[in-house]
Amino acid sequence: MVQRTKSQARKRTPFEAENVLTLTPRETVQYTRFGINRTYQLLRSGRMPSIQVGKRFFVPKAALIKWLESPDAGWVEPRTDRSTRPLNTSKMPRKTT
């Protein structure tokens, strides 16, 4: 076995590591092809299966696969607070007549 320093270590992908039980959010993004913001939104809301240790999230690989196969995977309710916000007209161009 070849010894590698930290800078030489090759990063693993979630597809290569079958013996890994949990994924980081960045690995989950690679696996699901969701965006990083959507992934964190799903993790924080509790809709994506995860384990939180302090501020860090870990996603159990088996639970993620099962969740992705479910019909409501990735669904996030649309934000309603944007529609109630008043329209900022100060930056809009004025019509000249």
Image (spheres, rainbow, N blue to C red):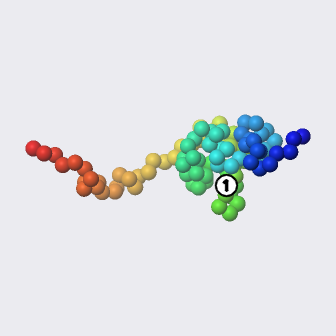
Q: From the image, tell me which residue sits under label 1.
A: 57
Given the current orientation, which residue lies at the most extreme bottom position?
54
Q: Looking at the image, which is closer to me, 6 or 63? A: 6
Which quadrant: the N terminus? Answer: top right
Given the current orientation, which residue lies at the most extreme left position?
97
Q: What SS does tag 1 mark?
A: strand
Question: Residue 12, position in %: x, y?
Answer: 74, 41
Asked whether residue 54 appears in the rendered view, the answer is: yes
Query: Is 69 positioned to the left or the right of 90 in the image?
Result: right
Q: What residue lies at 68% left-to-right and 63% top-to-bottom?
A: 54
Query: Is 9 positioned to the left or the right of 71 in the image?
Result: right
Which quadrant: the C terminus? Answer: top left
Asked whether residue 62 appears in the rendered view, the answer is: no
Q: What residue lies at 67% left-to-right and 44% top-to-bottom?
A: 27
Q: Residues within 10 Å of mark 1 (few under 14, many from 20)?
A: some
Amino acid type, label 1: Phe
Given the current orientation, which residue lies at the most extreme right position?
1
Question: Residue 69, position in %: x, y?
Answer: 65, 36
Q: What residue lies at 27% left-to-right and 53% top-to-bottom?
A: 91
